[in-house]
DNA sequence: CGTTGCATTGAAATCCCTCAAGCGAGGTGG
DNA sequence: CCACCTCGCTTGAGGGATTTCAATGCAACG
């Protein structure tokens, strides 16, 4: 409905790279698709929308999240270049996804993926493996949210990001403090305070608000 | 290693119902298996043990959980009669499982399940569906742990349990306050206080510590 | 060079945790 | 059969970590 129409012509901000290419979702899953650009904070899909596509980040970053009726938000994951997201088993999406920064996203029709999985056992197995990996990650997050302190959460997050998004001379954090807070189950103020605390302890340097350099991995390991 | 050997003869407390029967893991997945009895607090499998079996609760209840090095524990789910658990994608278990009360558990060799999934697309699809359902549930828990207050967590839990474990004239809670606390990311004292608070507000009655009667579902819905 | 929005910092308040004691049901042994 | 013991649950008081409220800082942009 009010969600994005995916048709190129009607897309609002999204610039489409015309179809004709293929998208590799996994080792043995390569399907025809196309790509679109999403501005920062633009919705890619919404909760309980029909799940017609599967998505892969080409560049930029995406947040998946669920919200309570009063607006409280829990981000369940960040998706970085190369990551596949929006994979659903039922007919509808069970969470929403938005770009945290301007991003290019590749789209594959779910019907195409479904046909492949129904015909190719290797592909079906890889779908299962991808879902299982997400499950492990979700449980890791449950441990973090249920039992870790603010410092431990932030340390875990920094280690995760430095592992996943290594840049030259530091790590880019392609999301706002608000996004981090809603991922870690904290407030933006606590995230900010904790980051400066970790910096004062010389474990990291905040080059800019969104760029860190890791100095003492061991200290973070201990804190996480 | 120190984990339980599954062989009937060597099992410590576990009484085995001899093999020969079959276990239905899903609509189109029925495989040979056997069943064992586990005492309350007895380990069914441990983190990073080899995942040789898949399990299904026949009677009783099971907790799946992960622990931090200092002993803090996060329960990721309770498994009630009919539920399948211990389904892994890699070679090893990524969490531990213990009986919360004396339970009868059916076991199926993972190799048997693997063979079936590799041959039968319907079975592979159902495995995927089961994993996906767990994923949705894990994300629901993330929202609870990251963004809900103590009252909201307890209310959500009570609604979940009354839906899943309805008994005549009330609901049986087949786990201790400590289990509830580690599932909800709270302490046992907060769980206890919150339950009596909810009782004082006439939403439930605590017949015994482990048996509740739901009086005002609407009030709990609002609180959740 | 002012505006705008995100990030940081400070002070006070709150919710939940920690520590501690009391209670009660179930089991055991006398 | 009853006294006693044990273990889990409940309740209270105080403290602490994180949130809330509020103000300031800072960088990007027009």
Image: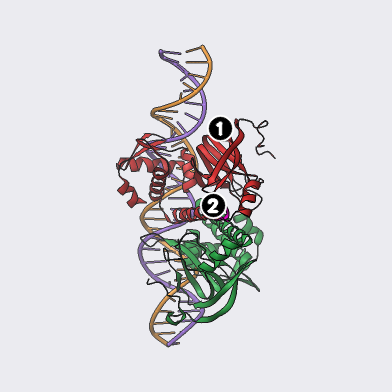
Chain colours: A green, B red, C orange, D purple
Stretch in magenta: B121-127
Subunit that carries the residue with mark 1: B
Mark yes or no: residue B71 visible.
Answer: no
Please tell me which residue is depicted at 47% across the width and 58% down the height of the picture.
A185
Q: Position of residue A153 (x, y in %)?
A: 54, 57
SS class of the residue under badge 1? loop
Give the label on residue A76, or none: none
Residue in view at x 58 percent, y 54 percent? B124
Q: Nearer the viewer, mark 2 or mark 1?
A: 1
Tell me, yes or no, if residue A33 can be seen here: yes
What main secondary structure does the magenta stretch of the protein show?
helix
Q: Quadrant of residue C25?
A: top left
Structural crowding at the residue carrying mark 1, measured as other residues with C-alpha within 10 Å and reported as few (<14), some (14–19) or many (≥20): some
The tag on residue B39 is 1
Residue B124 is covered by the magenta coloring: yes
- In the image, residue A73 lies at what x, y percent? 43, 62
- Asked if the magenta segment contains residue A39, the reply would be no
The residue indicated by pointer 2 is A143
B153 or B217, which lies in front? Answer: B217
Q: Residue at x 58, y 58 (%)?
A: A128
Subunit under mark 2: A
What kind of element bears circle 2?
Answer: helix
């Amino acid at each position: 409905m009010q969600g994005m129409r995916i048709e190129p012509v009607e897309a609002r901000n999204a610039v489409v790279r015309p179809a004709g290419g293929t998208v590799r979702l996994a080792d043995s899953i390569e399907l025809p698709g196309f790509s679109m650009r999403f501005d920062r904070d633009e919705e890619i899909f919404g909760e309980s929308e029909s799940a017609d596509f599967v998505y892969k980040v080409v560049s930029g970053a995406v947040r998946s999240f669920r919200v309570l009726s009063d607006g409280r938000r829990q981000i369940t994951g960040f998706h970085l270049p190369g990551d596949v997201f929006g994979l659903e088993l039922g007919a509808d999406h069970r969470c929403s996804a938005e770009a945290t920064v301007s991003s290019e996203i590749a789209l594959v029709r779910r019907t195409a993926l479904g046909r492949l999985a129904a015909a190719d056992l290797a592909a079906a197995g890889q779908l299962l493996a991808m879902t299982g990996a997400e499950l492990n990650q979700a449980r890791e997050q449950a441990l973090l949210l249920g039992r870790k302190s603010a410092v431990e959460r932030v340390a875990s997050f920094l280690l995760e990001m430095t592992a996943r998004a290594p840049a030259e001379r530091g790590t880019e954090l392609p999301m706002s403090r608000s996004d981090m807070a809603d991922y870690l189950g904290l407030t933006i103020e606590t995230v900010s305070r904790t980051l400066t605390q970790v910096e004062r302890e010389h474990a990291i340097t905040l080059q800019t608000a969104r760029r860190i350099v890791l100095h003492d991995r061991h200290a973070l390991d201990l804190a996480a």
